[in-house]
Image (cartoon, coloured by chain):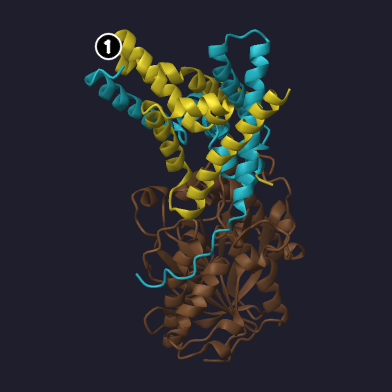
Chain colours: A brown, B yellow, C cyan
Amino acid sequence: MAKKQGKQTYLMQQCLTVRAWAAVGSKKEGQGPLASGFDLIEPDSTFGQDSWEKAESRMVSLTVAKALSNAALTYEDIDCIFAGDLLNQCVGTTFGLRDSGIPLFGLYGACSTMAEGMLLASLLVDSQTVRRAMAVTSSHFCTAERQYRFPLEYGSVRPPSAQWTATASGAVVLEEGNQPPYLRAAAVGTVEDLGVTDQNNMGAAMAPAAAATLRRFFADTNTSPEQFDLIATGDLGAIGSQLLVELLQRDGIDIKSRHTDCGLLIYDRQKQDVHSGGSGCGCSASVLGSYLLPSLRDGKIRNLLFMPTGALLSPTTVQQKESIPGIAHLVWLSHEKEGIL
Amino acid sequence: MSAIFLSYLKAFVVGGLICLVGQLLIDFTKLTPARILVAFVVAGVFLSGLGLYQPLIDFAGAGATVPLTGFGATIARGVRDAVREYGFMGILLGPLTASAAGITAAMIAGLIVSLVFKSGDKS
Amino acid sequence: MVKKASPPSKIAATLPGAFLIGGLICLLGQTLIDGYAALGVEQKFCPVAASCTLVALAALLTGLNIFDNIAKYAGAGTLVPITGFANAVASPALEFKTEGMVLGVGAKMFLIAGPVIVYGVAAGVLYGLIIWLFGLY
């Protein structure tokens, strides 16, 4: 049973390992710097389907299948799966898992879903309630665009602060085990809203949530940034990252030298026209699978705080002139079974 | 020959300038494109109502009629004609009738496009 | 309400594109007006015919997935001319085909362009009221 530490952090009491993972992407992700780490790059973002929503679901089912084959497991070996995405009623993941037969916990954490799923999976596995749990999430540029913004062919102008929703998906398999990467602890986030209303500047909207969760984690565990090699946020992009560093500096916490953002890792901002970087649930999930987890397994990264952030808006709330609340969930992934705490 | 060239130049410059105003609004105000379009149409109605837009049309031709302000001016002219002809009923008959061609064209073009083409990912 | 700090600066490199493409579209419109006049179309119908041709062209480019690439560079240059209106109608029509011809295409066609018609007509009605009331016609 995971031990609650402080207000929002849970320390794992068993030795939890990420047994396997998978990352799937499409054309733009295949042109990015992490392409070689992806299990599958499908340049045709329709994934052979006749609607964008079906394409996203297909991508999800491919990702889950790949993670299972990487784990040398079958669908029956998984006790439950935690899944969510950006679409209304989370149909991206639900329909993608429709034929899997895996007991499903549907989640909504916007772009923070990967960490939320891993966090919940870890609690169930650590308490030995289940033996093996999975977490999966996805995003698709076209489905996000047509739901949250405009039809794809509409000639809208994207401001410099806008981010590119990644067409990507990531899945992990969690169980007790003795191989790195290990899942050592997790922290659940609170909803934070500092009044940002510009939905073209999501990074700024989510930075306060990231700052709050990170602050809370360090306080709960009595640790500090220097003890971790890398703090990877989900899709704060260039502007949100800068804001996060500044917000934490005000509290005397300096993460500048070890902070990176999945939205900045997944694309080459010089060569690819993605403005402020990548975003979407699939952004952090696929960067996790294509780069962060392999690096943790090999020891290139020893201790990682994986903290994707979510913007909890809906098209309706924006039209009603509401501000954009954010949330950030954190998972501590490590190459080592012990140490730091 | 040079008269034709001059008319094209005027259309180009005036049209470009009207678009420039729109771009300034996009870049330096919080106005979204949708609101800017509405503003331009409404502005066209009232500029025409004040007799200020027809001179621009006479001067720049398509440079004034093609931008959405021209669409508004068309609505205003239609309202004037309809009220002249039908009195009060002209208020109801005028606006949509005047803009009918543009709206119908857009509707039918959109319908045909939806039948022939497929939605595509952005490059 | 802290930290509204550091939003990025808007690049005024958008202005040339808007002027150029906007001007070019209007230039094309003028060419069409002259062309239709030469073909014998009544003078009073030439501007309308030209506008409708531009509408058709913009819709076609929307269907071919080219319009948004031009718009990215042109900004207001494609938005302000009637091409913007056409794209605003054609793009949801195309996009929502997956939801069917009636509830998708039919119902959502004016999702973006609707306000232009509503408030254009409203302005016309208001104007009509004024001139009728004061006999200004």
Q: Position of residue A28 (x, y in %)?
A: 70, 54
Closest to the observer: B52 or C100?
Answer: B52
Q: Position of residue A170 (x, y in %)?
A: 62, 61
Closest to the observer: A65 or A245?
Answer: A245
Q: At numbered mark 1, what does the secondary structure look like: helix, strand or loop?
A: loop
Q: Residue at x 59, y 51 (%)?
A: A100
From this view, report whether residue A238 is shown above or below residue A44.
below
From this view, report whether residue A80 is shown above or below residue A98.
below
Give the amino acid at mark 1. Answer: Gly
Q: Quadrant of the N terminus of chain B?
A: top right
Check disc 1 and report the residue beneath it: B87
Q: Is residue B96 left or right of residue A146?
A: left
Q: Is residue A19 left or right of residue B64?
A: right
Q: Is residue A338 visible?
A: yes
Q: Is residue C133 left or right of residue B46?
A: left
Q: Position of residue B63 (x, y in %)?
A: 57, 31
Q: Is residue A3 visible?
A: no
Q: Image quadrant of residue C41? A: top right
